[in-house]
Amino acid sequence: MTVQKNDYPKAPNTLVHGALLTYIAGLLLLIAFCSPYWVQSFHDTYSSFKHMGLWEYCFDSFRYPYYQFDHLFNGCHHIFSQEYYVIREWLLPPWLMFVQAFVTIGFLLSFGSQILMALQLCRWPLEFVLQYEWILTAIDFICTAITSVLLFLAVAVFGGSHFRRDWLMYPNWNYLSWSYGLAVISFFFHGFAALLLYRAAKQSYEKRREARNLIMQMHPEQQSTW
């Protein structure tokens, strides 16, 4: 027996709302991941450091005091560019590498779960989604929950370390900027989405178990293939 168009269970509302929150959180995470405004200097300080992100630093006539040559660093460059080769160890302390790793893994998990949720919402492939929806939703929950935990660790470590005096000079002239704020909001949204996806997975499992019990009652002589 084939399932006719529009004659099959739609995605539960908890899954729809969880997916919507995850999509919004993923967009915010994408912007925070790519934008160079995690830390920014106050305009009135006229600091040679301007702003930075996870992968980019911007300077204006900056001299690194421990570099033996009188070289001025200007403009915005990727952290792994040749321009920053001589100061990369200073620009990229171990705690910042941990933040990069946490955000990158969270980014991949978030967008992987978004692809999976899109397939569930579109009900494609239909038979596979209907049969294993509770497992797929559980995977969504796990990925989103791990993303939330990783983002919490990332923003906590970054927020607690950006004032270190062995990193950017004159840290009192700098402040956490809007890219960092988007990462914090994304952490909260992923957390709320994980709660909704947990409820959706639990509801899908309960429906599957009820349907299985009903079939066993109607056909006790047959082995269930669920």
Image: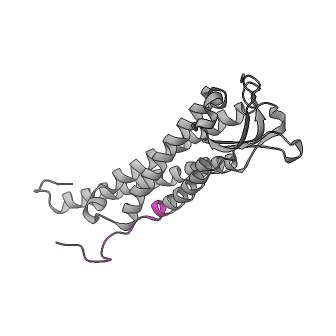
Kindly indicate the quadrant of the structure image that contains residue 213: bottom left
Residue drawn at 73 percent across, 24 percent down: 166
From the viewer's perspective, tell me whether residue 53 is left or right of residue 196: right
* Rendering coords of residue 60 (x, y %): 77, 42
Was residue 86 drawn as part of the magenta stretch in this picture?
Answer: no
Was residue 3 drawn as part of the magenta stretch in this picture?
Answer: yes
* Rendering coords of residue 39 (x, y %): 73, 42
From the viewer's perspective, tell me whether residue 157 is left or right of residue 116: right
* Residue 169, placed above or below residue 42: above
Q: Quadrant of the N terminus?
A: bottom left
Q: Quadrant of the C terminus?
A: bottom left
Write the start and end of the magenta stretch as one range. 1-16
* Rendering coords of residue 144 (x, y %): 49, 48
Q: Is residue 4 visible?
A: yes
Residue drawn at 30 percent across, 61 percent down: 130
* Rendering coords of residue 164 (x, y %): 74, 28
Q: Is residue 144 visible?
A: no
Kindly indicate the quadrant of the structure image that contains residue 59: top right
Number of numbered discs visible in the structure rendering? 0
